Image (cartoon, rainbow, N blue to C red):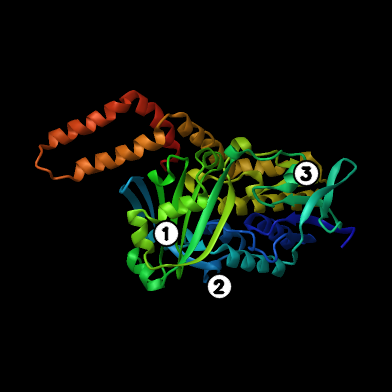
Amino acid sequence: MSEDKFDAIVVGAGPAGTTAAITMARAGLNVVLLERGEYPGAKNVQGAVLYSKMLHDVVPDFWKEADSPCERPIVEQRTCITSGDSFVTAGYRSAKFLEGIPNCYTIIRTRFDQWYAKKAEEAGVNLLCGVKVDDVVRKDGRVAGVKTSDGDELLADVVIAADGVNSILAQKAGLRGELKPAEVALGAKEVLGLPSEKIEDRFALGKGEGATIEFFGSVSLGMLGYAFLYTNKESLALGVGCKLSHYMKSGVRPSEHLELVKKHPLISKLIEGSKPLEYSAHLIPEGGFHSMPPLARDGFLVCGDAAQMINPAFREGSNLAMTSGMLAGQTVVEAKQKGDFKEATLSAYVDKLKASYIWPDLEETADIETHIESCEGFLDFYPKLACELAHLRFAADGQPKKEHFAKALGLVKQRGLFRMARELFPLRKVAV
């Protein structure tokens, strides 16, 4: 493999890297896609919800294919605010989610990544698995390829780093240093086997339909994070995720956190009788817009998790990965046509991101988590308030309703109306 030359090298066969590779190969470029795992998906353990529109742009009507990797189309999404054993739930269910291009599906990443990599091979991409990339190759001051752990050098006009949150290539290319604990979340997930009929019965779903539930509040043990429960065909994905800095400060292990979450009254009933099939833990980019590294250098681009492109406020990651991968691929195709792979030309990638939904969305929500962390007691007070207000609203305890209102007003006064307004107003950005 030594001294092989390609038009482009993509490192990482996840949603971002595979999309970039497909985009370039379909335009006639000679592309190699390198995956360090034994097979695509071997190192990926996302939750996982896949947003359809972005994949449909690459593989039209993918959900109709006989070997489609989709588990269940999501018809209902719920948010659950917990305070001890109490909880307030808000959700939205609509058949509109299934009209035209279905909004999103649950997937199992191991299966999805292998399916998607096959699409890349069908498009003419050279897929090489079990290849660990340790460094970039530089020639004349620019990135000109990659060096593998076996000592081989692969050369290309452009290298696209899609090698995940701990991007070795972004570091070796000098775009960023080691990530700080406050810039990543640590997630733990367990796949729990359960017959499809029981899943549909417990979540009040039609045959083949799916639902998601995100849990906030006391389930996060005072840390900035959440728990989730997603429905697959014959299994449930139950997981937790909190900032790594919070786990380190609290001393709580993600596995311990997950076991505590399983005991919550609502969750324990939904997973009752299920069989543990798989456990995994992984890092998730959390720094967002402010932690995004430079995205273009001479002969080099970064996309997906490697570029910190995740929007935790809206539970979006795979869509950003695929869109950024497509835009990176399009940029390389245009650069190839010009015969110019310098930073000035490849920076068109950044312009494309700014013209898409990615840059505006990440910029808009960039300070949400920092704001919440700056508000003392936020993660404890508001879940408690939500549950107390709900209790007063629904309690029929023989007291006049005006006394309930007075108690509710007293709860608000504990925090202070103007203080609450200052704390809650910035969250308008994630309301819709």
| CA distance separating discs 3 and 2 | 40 Å
- Which residue is tagged 3? 172
Is disc 3 placed on a helix, strand or loop? helix
Nearest to the observer: residue 92 or residue 113: 113
Instruction: Identify the image quadrant of residue 342.
Output: top right
Q: Dot 3, how many residues are within 10 Å of its Cα: few (below 14), some (14-19), or many (20+)? A: some
Q: In x, y percent, where is residue 389?
A: 25, 39
| Label whose residue precedes the other's in the sequence (3 or 2) | 2
Q: Position of residue 193 (x, y in %)?
A: 45, 69
In the rendering, which numbered label is found on residue 65? 2
Judge whether 120 appears above or below 350 on screen: below
Seen from the viewer's position, the closer of residues 31 and 182 is 182
* Left or right: 266, with 69 as reference point: left
Q: Identify the residue under disc 1.
A: 97
Q: Is residue 43 left or right of residue 5?
A: left
Q: Earlier in the sequence, mark 3 or mark 1?
A: 1
Disc number for residue 30: none
Quick one: SS at disc 2? loop
User: Which class describes the residues within 10 Å of circle 2: few (<14), some (14-19), or many (20+)?
Assistant: few
Q: Position of residue 294 (x, y in %)?
A: 70, 38
Residue type (three-letter) at the residue carrying disc 2: Glu
Residue type at mark 3 is Lys
Quarter of the rendering occupied by the C terminus: top left
Residue appearing at x 56%, y 58% in the figure: 280
Residue type at mark 1 is Phe
